[in-house]
Each structure stands twice: as C-alpha cells, then as structure tokens.
Amino acid sequence: MNLPNSLTLLRIFIVPLLVVVLLTPFSENWFGVPRHVLGVALFLGAALTDYLDGRLARSRGQVTRLGQLLDPIADKLLISAALISLVENQLAPAWAVVIIIGREFAVTGLRSIAAVEGVVISASKMGKFKMLAQVVTVALLIASSVGGQPPVANFGKPFPAIEFWSVPELRMAWQHLVAGGPTTGNDWQVLLYTAGRAMLWLVVISACTSMYGYFTSFYREFTRIDAKRNDLREPAAKLPY
C-alpha cells in the first residue's frame, strides 16, 4: 500500500458518499449546504485523485499490480454512480447513460481478453478525451440541479439538447447574460444545465468513437497474433509421418 493506491481507494470510498449526497437531503440536513454544491465538490475531488494517483505512481516509481487493477475499477464506479444518480434526478436521459456505461463494460471486457493473451491495449487519445468530457458533463449537470431536480423539466421538449434554443427560460437567461443585466441563480442553473445536456451528446459520440477504435486495435492485434501462430504451425504440418 502506497500513496497512489491510497488515493485510488479513497476514490472508491467516495462513491457511496456521493450517491447519498446526490439522492438524499443529507447535505442540507446535516451541513446546511445545497446538495449540488457538495456533490460537485465531492465529484471533482474524486476526479482529481484519478489524475494524481497515476502521476504520483509514475513519478515515484510506485506502479503496482494492485494500482493497475484498482484504478480502472475506481474510475468506472465513480462515473457510473454519478451518471445513474443523474438519471434518478432526471438530470440526464437514461438512453445516453446506458450507452456510456455499456461502452465501459465492453471496453473493459475487451482489455481483459487481450490481457489473457499478453496484449496490452493502452488508452487512446479519444478515450482520454471522453473521460475529460465525462467529468465536465457530470459536474455541469450536478451544479445545475435545484434540490436535486433539473431547473427546467426536460426543457418541455422530447430532445432537449437539440431544441434547447427554443426554450423561453434559456432565451431569457441568455439575454440577461449578454445584455449585462441582473442574472439570477436560476438563470445560471439553466445555462449550466443546457451546457451539460449539450456536452452529454459529445460524451456519447466520443464514447462510441473510442469504442470503435479499441475494437479495431483489438482486431488488428489478434489478426497479427493469429497469423504468427499459423506461420509457426505450417512447417510442422509439412513434416512426413
């Protein structure tokens, strides 16, 4: 056990606390702090440990098998718990969360199969971008909530992230911001919610794109391994019996 692994474990232990804060009035009742404020602080703090544990492990030469195992598990627990909590609070659509979490399971399974064959599929640039976009998206959506609920009920539209410009509350908030007039807390929450819902589309697209990249790398590596195995078998097949 070292400092990087301790940070990874801390991220895992934050997950149930984050769920309690996002789904119950625990924050308001015990600390007098709005749940969206404490929720954002907890989530961003946990996301920061994801950056620090890897950086410290490499700089200190403390990369361990335990850390390599726990780090992706901690990441997926944090993101999955936050996204499912957002669905429960009607801050994110279930279909988008199913795609994102399904992608995580698919890529994890792919990497596990590859690891059995001794093949390491490293994180791609698109995968890293997707992770950053997820953190920003979740933070925006948590910060936009009012008592755990969205500031505008689904924008009154079936596809709010596409038709957000037609929502009166958003137009009013944008006009207040551009005109330099007085902006209310609700104006900022509507703007944050709009940005978060729009970013969610970016996360879904980047998740699908990065998954395609991982599966392509997997197919290419295993095609190469299979070809090498066939080359090794071929001379033996020509031996006389």
Image (cartoon, rainbow, N blue to C red):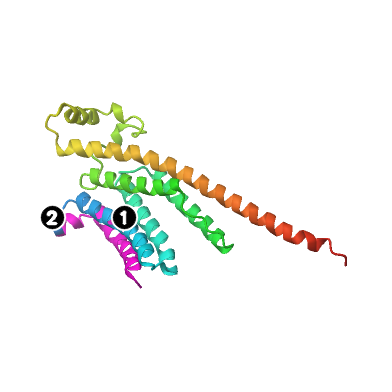
User: Of tags 1 and 2, which is closer to the observer?
Assistant: 1
Cα distance, mark 1 to mark 2? 24 Å
Residue type at mark 2? Gly
Give the SS element for disc 2.
loop
Does the CB distance between marks 1 and 2 fall below 8 Å? no
Mark 2 Cα-neighbour bin, 10 Å: few <14, some 14–19, many ≥20:
few
Looking at this view, is 38 or 68 the one in front?
68
Magenta span: 1-30
At which x and y percent is residue 212?
52, 45
Q: Residue furthest left?
A: 182
Residue type at mark 1? Ala
Above or below 88: residue 12: below
Quarter of the image that includes the C terminus: bottom right
Q: Is residue 205 magenta?
A: no
Q: Quarter of the image holding residue 198?
A: top left
Give the SS element for disc 1.
helix
Q: Residue at x 26, y 47 (%)?
A: 142
Q: Is residue 25 magenta?
A: yes
Above or below 198: residue 222: below
Name the residue tied to disc 2.
32
Sequence order check, earlier mark of 1 and 2: 2
Q: Residue furthest right?
A: 241
Majority secondary structure in the magenta region: helix
Q: Quarter of the image holding residue 2?
A: bottom left
Name the residue tied to disc 1.
47
